[in-house]
Image (cartoon, rainbow, N blue to C red):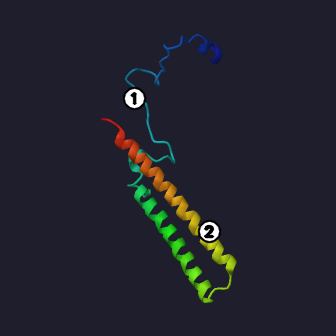
């Protein structure tokens, strides 16, 4: 019997797959290679949400401090590259806007979850 004729005889809603022969056989179940299990994310070296947010905020803070220092150096005459200062200021501005948009999304999600009834 070929595949097409076998599939055509299946009545919808009645198909039960045959698991490797008899009813006492247990299927061999193993994790998919390269896929982390839900409980393994922190234990096996994965980063947590807290660590990710801390790193992101640290990067934003570094950009703001660099921008501030370059602006002060430009004002005092220590820095003469205006393009570098403007680029640094814009990077810091974009990083701060991105962090604030993430904060807004997290607060909206928290508000939505707190409104749920249990």
Q: Quadrant of the C terminus?
A: top left
Residue lying furthest left in this view?
Answer: 118
Residue 3 in the image, given as x and y percentages of width and height = 63, 18
Marks 1 and 2, how far apart at CA? 61 Å
Q: Residue at x 49, y 63 (%)?
A: 56
Choose the circle earlier in sequence order: 1 or 2.
1
Residue 45 in the image, given as x and y percentages of width and height = 42, 58
Q: Badge 1, how many Cα within 10 Å: few under 14, some, many 20+?
A: few
Front one among 20 and 12: 12
Q: Image check: 3 left or right of 29?
A: right
Residue on which the image places disc 1: 26
Residue 33 in the image, given as x and y percentages of width and height = 51, 46
Q: Image check: 63 left or right of 31?
A: right
In the rendered view, tell whether residue 17 sits above or below residue 55. Answer: above
Q: Badge 2, how many Cα within 10 Å: few under 14, some, many 20+?
A: some
Residue on which the image places disc 2: 90
- Nearest-to-viewer mark from 1 and 2: 2
In the rendered view, tell whether residue 68 sits above or below residue 8. Answer: below
């Amino acid at each position: 019997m070929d595949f097409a004729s076998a599939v055509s005889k299946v009545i919808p809603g009645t198909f039960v797959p045959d698991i490797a022969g008899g009813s006492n056989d247990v299927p061999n179940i193993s994790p998919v290679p390269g896929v982390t299990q839900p409980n393994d994310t922190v234990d096996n070296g994965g980063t947590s949400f807290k660590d990710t947010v801390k790193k992101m905020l640290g990067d934003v803070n570094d950009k703001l401090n660099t921008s501030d220092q370059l602006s002060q150096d430009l004002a005092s005459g220590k820095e003469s590259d205006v393009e570098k200062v403007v680029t640094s200021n814009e990077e810091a501005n974009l990083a701060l806007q991105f962090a604030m948009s993430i904060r807004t999304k997290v607060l909206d999600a928290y508000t939505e979850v707190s409104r749920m009834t249990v």
